[in-house]
Image (cartoon, rainbow, N blue to C red):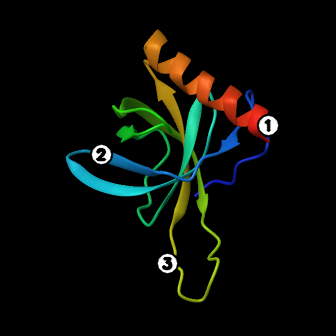
Amino acid sequence: MESYSEKRRTKRVPFRLRVNCRKSGVFFSDFARDISRDGIAVETPAFIGKNMVVDMSFYLPDETEPLVVTGRVVWSTVKEPRTNHDNLGAVLGIQFEGLSAVQRNKIVNFINNSRSDA
């Protein structure tokens, strides 16, 4: 697994919501750690290799319909356990691919509203 340097093109904001993922017909549900206009970091017990394509769906706060998006794993790192009972796993950096203008606007609006709440 690769380590990821903190050279982000866009600001990420904390985002702790469930993300449903599908890769090669395998379904799993994990939690997002943070989100930016370009991607999302997902904590998972599954180790998914760099460049793998993942289909995802998640609800932004105050939305009634999930965002259904595709992304590509651009980095992964071993997840640090928070407690002795925490499962080992990974954090995946997933870059969004092919977002519509509506999807991108919803994400950007969420990020902008999150920044103003801080």
Residue 71: give x, y in percent of width and height: 44, 33
CA distance for labels 3 and 2 = 21 Å
Residue 78: give x, y in percent of width and height: 60, 65
Residue 75: give x, y in percent of width and height: 59, 46
* Depicted 81 relative to depicted 99: above or below: below
Q: Which of marks 3 and 2 is in front?
A: 3
Q: How crowded is mark 2: few (under 14 residues within 10 Å), some or many (20 or more)?
A: few
On residue 7, the disc is: 1
Q: Which amino acid does label 2 sit on?
A: Lys
Quadrant location of the C terminus? Answer: top right
Return the residue found at the far top.
Answer: 101
**Element under label 2?**
strand
Q: Which amino acid does label 1 sit on?
A: Lys
* Depicted 99 relative to depicted 76: above or below: above
Q: Which residue is drawn at 55% across and 26% down?
A: 107
Residue closer to the observer: 93 or 103: 103
* Depicted 115 relative to depicted 34: above or below: above
Return the residue found at the far left.
Answer: 25
**Side of 16 where 10 appears, left or right:** right
**Side of 73 where 110 appears, left or right:** right
Residue closer to the observer: 71 or 83: 83
